[in-house]
Image: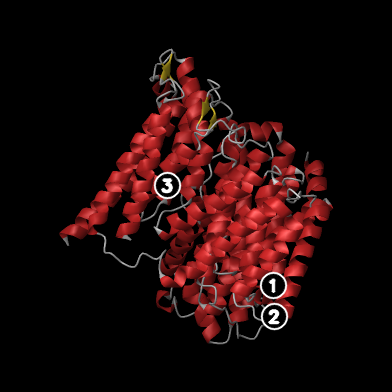
Amino acid sequence: MMMDVLANVMSWQIVLAILCGVAAGISIGAMPGLTSTMGIALLMPFTFQLEPAVGMMLLIGEFVGAIYGGSITAIMVNTPGTPSAAATVLDGYPFTKRGESCRALGISTVASAGGGIISGVFLILIAPQLAEIALKFSAPETFALAFFGISIIASISGKELLKGLISGTFGLILALVGMDNISGLSRFTFDTVFLMNGLSFIPVMVGLFAMSQCFVSMEELYDEIKITAKITSPIPTWADLKKIFPTILRGGVTGTLVGIIPGAGGDISAFISYDMEKRVSKHPELFGTGIVEGIAAPESSNNGTTGGALIPLLTLGIPGDANTAVMLGALMVFNLTPGPQLFVEQALVVNTLFAGFMIANVVMLVMGLSGIRIFTKIVQIPKPVLVPIIILMCVIGSFAINGNYLDILVMFGAGVIGYLLLKGGFPLSPIVLALILGPMAEGNLRRSLVMSQGDYSIFLTHPIAATFIVIALISLFWPIVRHLKNHRSTKAA
Amino acid sequence: MKKMNIGVSLFFIALACYVLFAARSFPGEIDHVPGPGYFPIILSAILILLSVLLIASSRHVSEASLGIFARQNRIVFVAGGLTVTYLALLYVFGFLIATPLYLIAILRFFSMTRWRSLLLTAALTTAASYAVFTTVLEVQLPSGLL
């Protein structure tokens, strides 16, 4: 198996996919306004002509690169390219003000790669064990798992809890479209063959995450990014490396653990690690003035979440955030149904993804240290040129899946709805999460009840299912209780 | 934001009402097991409840600028209109004719004033994307009705 994996991961197709994915990811992540989710959604339709492992490596490379890429503009122009890099601004930009931007970029590159590699080790160690446990799951456990996945909507909605719940319910309703798998009845298809298999979720995702972002970008079309700092070699000194080594270890582990928790992403883990590093530091007062640990902590942590987030995705089929939700869609199109069976039936592909993930982090390190000049040039591409090109990719991408013109209209419609919802402060990730997990929850609930002849206690007599349902209820109602508590205390104040 | 919340809530209430109406023909239960009508009814009821809660909670929200219909957003509407026109042209004339026309129109609208660079960008982007997607990635592009 080991030799097969090595041969697979060293094939020119996978190496090229990793190189292209990481390069695209760094470029997309570095551009404020373009998100890693948008990058994955945009690239996804073009991967379906490729071998599953090659296509997935392109997306994983993009994911890894984009989370790191956000630090480039965070350090150089005080604007995080992605939300994950928001904490990097605190100590990153003071370096640029002192004329040491390249030193900061070097630290962020090494820390990001270090955090990513640590999370990769966890991914390789934990995922197969978890998958083995999940192999025992039947319909009640799978329903409970899907219900748990949907309950995450409450925690990923942030401050806009009510709006997040509305978005999630909207997503669940969209998931009803198509032929009912159990009874064979058509629901909300308007008697069209096009909707028989449900809403094609790739055009929906491209519309929600890429097309809507184009509309948002048009509002600030003439905001230019000017990088004036002189670019020199960003390779860190030995003294800096020694200083940041323990920080990277702590950040990488923290990031991985946060990444495993569905709903918590790179932005949260970066701030947790930054705060943790400040607490363990002998000079906490220096944080915020431009010190190397202030960059290494958030950067190792946010890239640590990448491997962490892949653990529940691959073993249980539960996406923890928008990035992995879009990747879940890609896995399904490749016929790689995530979950424990994937580790049995597609062991070679899974192990190739593990090895490829590690290589992607090494590629990111090399590209970050050697190609920073190129990436700073890409960041400065004017938006009036960039936006039409992204729209073109949205159109081509949504048509490419089935060669159906109606998919373009679905994409555009989803883009308009996404834009309007974004303007109203409605989070979009719950829609995708619900759209993907909805059919899994509904189908397995009904299958479980067929097994028990309509007796709902089946979910209590299966201990794993019962545990997941309890966790799901806590995950769903705890943010609501906390929200109400905060609301009351604000009112009282 | 207040108007926006109310507007979006009303849209979701209307959608939920439609789902409720359409779901009345689906069996709610088959042999004591939830049927195809069970989830649509539950979900539309939840959506109505949440939307009503949002309307109620919006009473205390300050009425800031609506954002969407603000003057500076004219660019989004015009570009959106151009994109709709592009999609129609794409259906009739196909990728190779519709795309350069769209790029010329939208780049011109986005203030690219020099005709030479405008035509060059439109031609090169169309040619490059056609070559990359059809030959390298073997992706099908819309060929149009004609």
Q: Give the left or right position of residue A462, taking residue A229 as reference.
A: left
Q: What residue type is labelled 1?
A: Leu
How many residues crowd around disc 1 within 10 Å: few (fewer than 14), some, or many (20 or more)? many
Marks 1/3 in contact by CB < 8 Å: the verdict is: no
Q: What's the distance in space between the residues labelled 1 and 3, CA to CA?
A: 41 Å
Q: How far apart are marks 2 and 1 (CA)?
A: 7 Å
Tell which circle, 3 or 2, labels the residue nearer the N-terminal end: 3
Residue corresponding to mark 1: A369
**Residue assigned mark 3:** A167
Residue B137: image location, x then y, percent: 79, 52
Report the mark closest to the observer, 3 or 2: 3
On screen, A76 above or below A312?
A: below
Which picture quadrant has residue A335? top right
Depth check: give the residue in front, A178 or A85: A178
Do discs 3 and 2 share a chain? yes
- Could you say where residue A383 lies in the image, as x and y percent from the top left? 60, 72
Indicate the quadrant containing the N terminus of chain A: top left, top right, bottom left or bottom right.
top right
Q: Check residue B37 in the rendering and tell me which mark sits there, or answer none.
A: none
Q: Which chain carries label 2?
A: A
Q: What element carries label 2?
A: loop
Q: Position of residue B91 (x, y in %)?
A: 68, 51
Amino acid of disc 2: Ser
In this view, the residue in front, A176 or A17, is: A176
Marks 1 and 2: in contact by CB < 8 Å? yes
In three-dimensional space, the C-alpha distance between marks 3 and 2, rounded to whole angstroms, equals 46 Å
**Mark 3 belongs to chain:** A
| A173 shown above or below A423 | above
Q: What residue type is labelled 3?
A: Ser
Q: Name the residue under label 2.
A: A233
Mark 2 and mark 1 lie on one chain; the one further toward the N terminus is: 2
Residue A406 % position (x, y):
63, 44
Does residue B58 appear anywhere in the picture? Answer: yes
